[in-house]
């Protein structure tokens, strides 16, 4: 069974001559198919933790292992390709490209990875858009979408290359209750159907209540919630 293990992670930010200890000796383990919630007040370090798990941000200390591979070892550069295959990331402010359609936003993942657009990728895109109930929007531009639909595209983009783990930063952050519930249920179904481990940073306790395990970040510490 695939596992992502972060151990003894420390992260401090320095700005304006003042340092903030965001994460102090945090450890967490995520297995394939697991749905894990990370809660905590604004500024507690949820985004920081997700970015460190995905390798988008470097920890000051500590290790991230995928199975027995240490993704934070000295030759970390060699792992960039592996990381891009292993992880999908749905950003807090979804960052869809305005000039690209829904389909093209998803296809960008393959283009960046150097894959030519081929039939196989096209099938994967249509399939995930279908799973998320937005295939009829594939030729629309982001400005034509509702907030909930945009969030679904951001999730499609995080999943389309079939990663083992997805990090989702407040996927229901700006949605009404009805759309939040749709996203909650779709993301949990995705994890279970595709056996993907998901880590969700959220302020939404209703969402957290549906996940397999929930942790709270408080004063740099991560505790079971
Ligand atoms: N690049 C940076 N430089 C300096 N400080 C930073 C940086 N990124 C984050 N911080 C600080 O680190 C702390 C944690 O930020 P983070 O974005 O992880 O919080 P969060 O839990 O995701 O908050 P929210 O719920 O508002 O999204 C905050 O105090 C923030 O100001
Ligand atoms: Mg955040």
Image: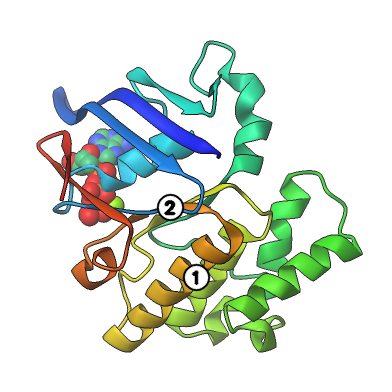
Mark 1 closeness class: few <14, some 14–19, many ≥20 residues within 10 Å = some
As rendered, which of 145 and 74 lies closer to the eye? 74
Distance in Å between CA atoms under marks 1 and 2: 11 Å
Residue 5 visible somewhere in the drawing:
yes
Q: How is the image coloured?
A: rainbow
Q: Which residue is mark 2?
A: 34
Depicted 135 relative to depicted 86: above or below: below
First in residue order: circle 1 vs circle 2: 2
Asked if disc 2 is less than 8 Å from ligand 1, the answer is: no
Q: Are marks 1 and 2 in contact (CB under 8 Å)?
A: no
Q: Which residue is mark 1?
A: 189
Residue occupying the point 26% across, 63% down: 208
Left or right placement of residue 219 versus residue 124 in this view: left
Residue occupying the point 66% across, 54% down: 162
Depicted 34 relative to depicted 157: above or below: above
Q: Residue furthest left?
A: 219
Mark 2 closeness class: few <14, some 14–19, many ≥20 residues within 10 Å = many
Left or right placement of residue 11 versus residue 77 in this view: left
Residue occupying the point 59% across, 67% down: 156
As rendered, which of 209 and 161 lies closer to the eye? 209
């Amino acid at each position: 069974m695939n596992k992502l293990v972060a151990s003894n992670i420390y992260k401090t930010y320095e700005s304006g001559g003042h340092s903030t200890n965001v994460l102090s000796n945090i450890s967490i383990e995520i297995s394939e198919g697991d749905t894990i919630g990370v809660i905590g007040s604004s500024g507690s370090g949820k985004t920081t933790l997700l970015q460190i798990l995905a390798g988008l941000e470097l920890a000051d200390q500590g290790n991230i292992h995928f199975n027995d591979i240490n993704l934070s070892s000295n030759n970390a550069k060699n792992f960039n390709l592996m990381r891009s295959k292993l992880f999908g990331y749905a950003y807090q402010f979804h960052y869809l490209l305005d000039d690209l359609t829904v389909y093209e936003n998803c296809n960008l993942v393959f283009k960046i990875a150097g894959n030519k657009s081929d039939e196989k990728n096209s099938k994967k895109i249509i399939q995930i858009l279908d799973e998320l109930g937005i295939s009829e929007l594939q030729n629309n531009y982001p400005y034509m979408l509702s907030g909930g639909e945009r969030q679904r595209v951001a999730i499609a983009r995080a999943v389309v290359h079939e990663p083992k783990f997805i990090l989702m930063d407040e996927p229901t952050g700006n949605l009404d209750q009805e759309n939040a519930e749709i996203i909650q249920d779709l993301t949990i179904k995705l994890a279970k159907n595709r056996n993907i481990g998901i880590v969700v940073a959220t302020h939404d306790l209703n969402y957290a209540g549906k996940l397999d395990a929930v942790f709270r970040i408080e004063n740099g510490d991560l505790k079971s919630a």
